[in-house]
Image (cartoon, coloured by chain):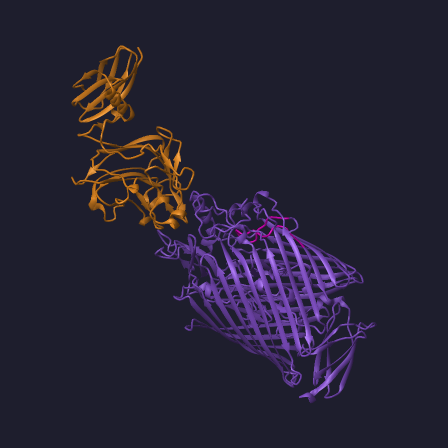
Chain colours: A purple, B orange
Amino acid sequence: MAQNKGVFKGVVTDGKEPVIGANVQLLLDKSKGAATNFDGEFAFESPIGMQKFIVSFIGMITDTVEVEIIKDMISTRKIVLQSNAEILQSVEVKVGKFDTDIKDMTISMEVIRPSLIENKNTRSVETILDQTPGLNIMDGEPQIRGGSGFTFGVGSKVAVLVDDMPMLSGDAGRPEWGFIPVENIDQIEVVKGAASVLSGASALSGAIHIKTAEPGVKPLTKVNLYSGFYSSPKDTAAMWWEDYPYVHGINFLHSRKIKNLDLVVGGLMNLDHGYIGAPKPGPFVQDSITNFSDDQMKSNKGRLNIGLRYHPKKMERLTFGVNANVMYNNTNMTLAWLDDTSGIYRAYPGGVILQNQLIYNIDPYVNYFTKKGMKHSLKARWLSTDNEMSANQSNFSDVFYADYQFKHVFEKVYDIKFVAGASTTQTNSISQIYTGGGDSTNSVGNYSGYFQIDKKLLERVNLSFGFRGENYILNDTISNLATIMRGGMNIKITEGTNFRVSYGQGYRYPTIAERFIRTRVGTFGVFDNPDLKPETSWNVEAGLRQGFKFGKLMGYLDAAVFKQEYQNTIEYLFGFWDPTYQFAIAGFKFLNTGNSQVVGLDASIAGQYKVEKKTAFNFIIGYNYILPTTLQPDEVFAEDFKPGGSGEFSYNSTSLDSAQKILKYRFLHTFKVDLEYVYREKLAIGTSARYFSKIENLDRAIIDFEEVTANTGGSLQEIRYLDYYENYNNVNLMLDARISYSFLKHHKIALVVSNLLNRTYSLRPLKVEPMRTTMLQYSLKF
Amino acid sequence: MVRNLLIAAVLIQGGICSAQQQLENTSFENWQNVGGPEEEPTEWSSIKTSDAGSFINSSAPQVCERSTDSHTGSYSVRLENKSVFGIVATGTLTNGRAHGDTNPENGYVFTDATDSQWNTAMTDKPDSLVGWFKYAPVSGDKAKVEAIIHSGAAQNPENGTSGNFVAKARFTTTATASSWTRFSVPFTYFNANASTHILVVMTAGDSTIAKAGSVAYFDDIELVYNVVGVNELDLNDIKVFNNSQRICVDLSSKNSYEITLKLFDLQGRELLKVNNLTKGINYLEKPKSNGVYLVNISLDGKMVTKKIVINN
């Protein structure tokens, strides 16, 4: 084996000076590489043949060089990196099936860099995602381009993947945000539009890819300590605590190479007083289920992750490793507020669940490169979730995922990039709340095969086509087959101007929870619907990406118009679903509600105004407009067993305002802005703003809930939302601010304030978002 | 003397001199759980104390409330039909117990013969059911008062229990009554069987087709006895008044029967007794001293007492 190697040697400069500490990595196998020394020099062994190397350094444009490595010879190159003048135009996409510059992609994508994650003292990844144009996080539930409403986090219509493997809870399809190692994120990529070919099932309206960092050539240690507090709400009557409303935490990361072993260790401890207090119901409410103390509402979380990668010396084409992550988290899930005034920061009796969660994943993987440059990779994940919940809502699930992938550039066959793979997912769930199938044990098996080919024509046109076949087997009996395709084209019109069109399909198989949940909390139940059909979607869009540079101002502008259509959309609706009224009088059920569409546009502009070397003004501004409408307003999709004549369920009959045919729980206009001023790379001042227009339409059942609870004379806590919705929830404009100062090279101290104006605001009905939080952060990085 | 005082007291209070069984707390002066969702007149029950269990009871609307708009005394009962997820829960009050159900068609009131909290004993045979009401119906709705004298267990609607029924009295109205209005309905006896209990229900709406928003007030519900006891005459039919010289008893609306009139003072002394009054206006001599006097008229086995004030 050793004889098939040569050496790649060279020097990296910025045109004048040597670049110290730049990474040079083999494209096919990024574990192979070196860092430049004080003179900008590097040298390392490489497999022979035409090889591509990635050369990167912070503040410089990443470059890819192609070098022929000859057996037992030294190939030498001088590499000149350009400064980051146009860095925002050339974000390298890392998680997609190919390493492609974002401007050449055929789909719409937003990229979040780790610097923003650190600067905002992100404690859980969903809070940073909410800053992404076109992506809203509604009480933990991701919405991309208005492609979903609100279903209490169950059955996410956006795929969430960590290192290209799914990270949704197996039984309920709920994103486990807190589990994602936020201290160790290399990059986040948000794909907008149906993306099931590449991202697998549940990418009905888009996908969020999170790539964790790999060890660089140099050891890296990061420690981040923070401490902060919640402000008193503006309405002091709503203030419920008497103790100090703390948030404390620490996270750390250490990565290094030890000979042929790469090691990453990271972790987090977070202690959170919380901003929502225990229920304090009225004097006549009997609450034996959620009579918690305020102390019980506090959250504690600990997480530890480790990554090991080994590349044996004698088999340099082989790398293998394992990543593991474990978290213990005790927290609460609050479904509704106590009331819309002084109880807005408290939970509704019966409407909060305490959760003790133990969750871990173990991901082994093997990569092998053939002599001809083909890449074979086999990766697997075991994700286990054990949720011990109050009110008999406990659940346990295991997800086993495995994916084999083959990737090659067929230079002799028209230079076609080809990727193909096969994956399988086996989900096993045990819970007394998923008994609608007759048993507390349920399983879903998935087998899928996929391929994608990319072809570049005339150096200007990128063509892409992908196909995926899926087969689902539910509890070993019910089988569903589906095929999904996508296609796209990107044309470089001029240097800096790219036009793209794409079409993609989405497919989402209902989760075990949506089909088989059968539970009761308090007065109302949640009913099973074993006949639930899979949701499907398609997305067509056209976009333009324009880079610009006017003197010291540079950046890009991206705009896309899109149309999506959804079939069999699953919503969560209240009705009388039990003809005997024995299990529960009434309650919620997941239902296929027919067809809908979303048309809209996305526009974002991002860039930098460079005042002088090391002093710059950075900006990211995004606007998203959607018009989400039903295509079947009168279609009766369900009938319940309402006493004295069944109720017919249609869009019209279940909508609070059906006049404009607007779908429920959608923001038609959203603005996201992030501005940052960096002075001499030492002082940074930043601010973020998020604007959400009023939600146009809600479930009509909210009227009934208010009336019924108000009529009980106090034996049920009064549910209060509509008055708030009409009078106080017209628009939401949120401001965050941050200031940081770096000193002595490795140290940084920062003050981060979220919800600067301390507004009391709500995005999804009956749930208030946090009041102002002020956080002091100290970071050590070396 | 003591005995006479007692008689007078009884006469003043109800105009009824009787040892017969009555309903309890019929003027709705005594209340339980005031201010709470289970606010109910003592000895009466509405739908939040039904037998359906805490889930249905806690989500059931509060349809019964204490009202200070009373016919006599301080309070009356206010019943309102209220909607629950589009299903109307009828404003209901019973001396038995409500059976709550999601489906109004399955709801009823019943006598729980095994638990005195949910029943009222009745072995007598009252002649009629009287009381006072106000009613603000949503158009087309119907308020109801119904009493069933029965043995053992009974439900209303009867649902297989009618074999135990002995007698029934039923009053309904669809008209708006914005001031206190009297109702009086006779019991219809189905058989001569012995009874054990009486089951009374008052509603603000027409059972399964009740309309949300109809409001009814009830006060001073009474059972009236005849023949063996002393039953009440319809006060509206007999007018007693005095002019400067005489007491006038107007029996214009009555056919001539054996009418007996007695005049008492407040010490219970019989001052005057006249047999065989005739149809039309009868004149009696006034007492000499000023004060309040009681005129007791017996007719066809029934009796009524009216107060007159003499001021010479």
State the residue in front, A64 or A758.
A758
Q: Tell me the chief SS of the magenta region.
A: loop
Q: In the figure, is residue A590 to the left or right of B217? A: right
- Residue A329 shows up from this direction: yes
- Residue B238 lies, with reference to residue A409, above or below; the image says above
Question: Quarter holding the C terminus of chain B?
Answer: top left
Q: Which residues are magenta?
A: A758-775
Report if residue A341 lies within the magenta region. Answer: no
Numbered disc total: 0
- Residue B279 shows up from this direction: no
State the image coordinates of residue A243 (x, y, percent, origin top left): 59, 48
Q: Residue furthest right?
A: A16
Report if residue A760 lies within the magenta region. Answer: yes
- Residue A127 lies, with reference to residue B235, above or below; the image says below
State the residue in front, A734 or A454.
A734
State the image coordinates of residue A434 (x, y, percent, origin top left): 43, 63
Q: In the figure, is residue B179 to the left or right of A274? A: left
- Residue B113 lies, with reference to residue A371, above or below; the image says above
Residue A577 image-quadrant placement: bottom left
Q: In the figure, is residue A253 to the left or right of A362? A: right
Residue A110 image-quadrant placement: bottom right
State the image coordinates of residue A493 (x, y, percent, origin top left): 70, 70
State the image coordinates of residue A556 (x, y, percent, origin top left): 71, 64
Question: Quarter holding the N terminus of chain B?
Answer: top left
State the residue in front, B162 or B30.
B30
